[in-house]
Image (cartoon, rainbow, N blue to C red):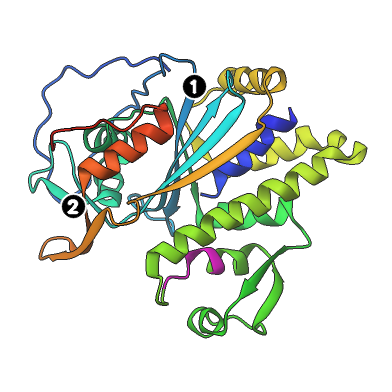
Amino acid sequence: MKQLFILLIAICIAGCQSQGNTGKQEPIGDTPVKHAPFYGVKDENGRINILVLGVDSRGEKHSRSDAIMVAQYDPKHQKAKLVSIMRDSYVKIPSYAKGYNKINTAYYLGGPELLRKTIKENFGIDVQHYVTIDFEGFVKIVDAVAPEGIEVDVPQRLIDDMGLKLAAGRQRLHGRELLSYARFRHDAESDFGRVQRQQQVLNALKDEFSNKASSLDGMFKLPGMGQELMKYVETDMSTQTILSIGGSMLLNPITEVQTMRIPVQAGYQDKTYKHAGAVLELDFIKNRAALKEFIIDEPKPVNESTK
């Protein structure tokens, strides 16, 4: 089960055939509605696409997604891919009365299902399952997987901004400190730097877990650790689905992990709207084509009409 638990680590940093939803949906305002069931769509080519959400939750019923990712496992080609979608991306939200808003607003208004629909409408890709984890869960997972901490380069500006009691430079950070490191965005790179740090932390956690799992002692601890990690996530996947994915990974282990970010370079403009604030207004032709090429291995078309 080593490969499965490595995937779960990736899911935490940051399963069903589509059942359809034929009922008429009333327009959504700015007030959250009851979250609809998740109607994930199975990839026809056998790839497993999972919507991964880091949730900005402090105990409230409705929260915003602080990190939005799509993780893919391709058993045929033994590859894993991870797409980070920046939360300020300005997108069309299905049935939303105002039409467009930041993509993390979709989760706030309608949960994982509305976010799935939003990603499908704007980027032309769908997901089969979802996983969410809140900040407290992230802290506990880091401390469980890497009790000695994760080594990163900590700039003085981050220390001052986040109120950390550290010295600048290479440091081993534990769960709560590493959460601050992954969330920091008050520098010249803003959210772009934060996405890069999130992916850096994810890879470091994956490597840490992989190293532990390679030892004999680590192998004996895997089942218990896997159960412990699952306490801190919410998902539509059943135990049977997780075991099925794990079995597939045993037969087709991951040999390569690729990452990308939306919006792509030169694929957006900084804009401000009264109802949404500062946003990233996307070049949808460029971003949709890049994402499809990455996730679906579909070459960029010579000509593609705008949305």
Please report the residue visible at 52 percent of the width from the left and 78 percent of the height from the top: 158
Q: Quadrant of the C terminus?
A: top left
Q: Who is closer to the viewer here, 268 or 227? A: 268
Q: Residue 90, percent across and down?
A: 21, 52
Query: Where is mark 2, residue-wise?
Result: 101
Q: Is residue 75 above or below residue 170?
A: above
Q: Quadrant of residue 77?
A: top right
Report the residue at 31% width, 14% height from top: 19
Secondary element at tag 2: strand
State which tag comes first along the sequence, 2 or 1: 1
Residue 127, compared with residue 12, is above or below; it is above
**Circle 1: is it few (<14), some (14-19), or many (20+) Cα within 10 Å?**
many
Q: Is residue 138 above or below residue 210?
A: below
Quarter residue 94 falls in: top left
User: Which residues lie in the magenta part?
Assistant: 181-185
Residue type (three-letter) at the residue carrying disc 2: Asn
Residue 267: horizontal and vertical position, in percent? 27, 53
Q: Nearer the viewer, residue 263 or 89?
A: 263
Q: Residue drawn at (7%, 44%), measured in percent from left and top? A: 97
At label 1, the amino acid type is Arg
SS at circle 1: loop
Mark linked to residue 47: 1
Q: Does the magenta stretch mainly form a helix, a strand or a loop?
A: helix
Can the viewer see residue 35 in this picture? Answer: no
The residue furthest front is 302
Q: Position of residue 255 (x, y in %)?
A: 67, 32
> Distance from label 2 to label 1 (Cα)?
30 Å
How dense is the environment of label 2, judged by Cα within 10 Å: few (below 14), some, or many (20 and up)? many
- Quadrant including the N terminus: top right
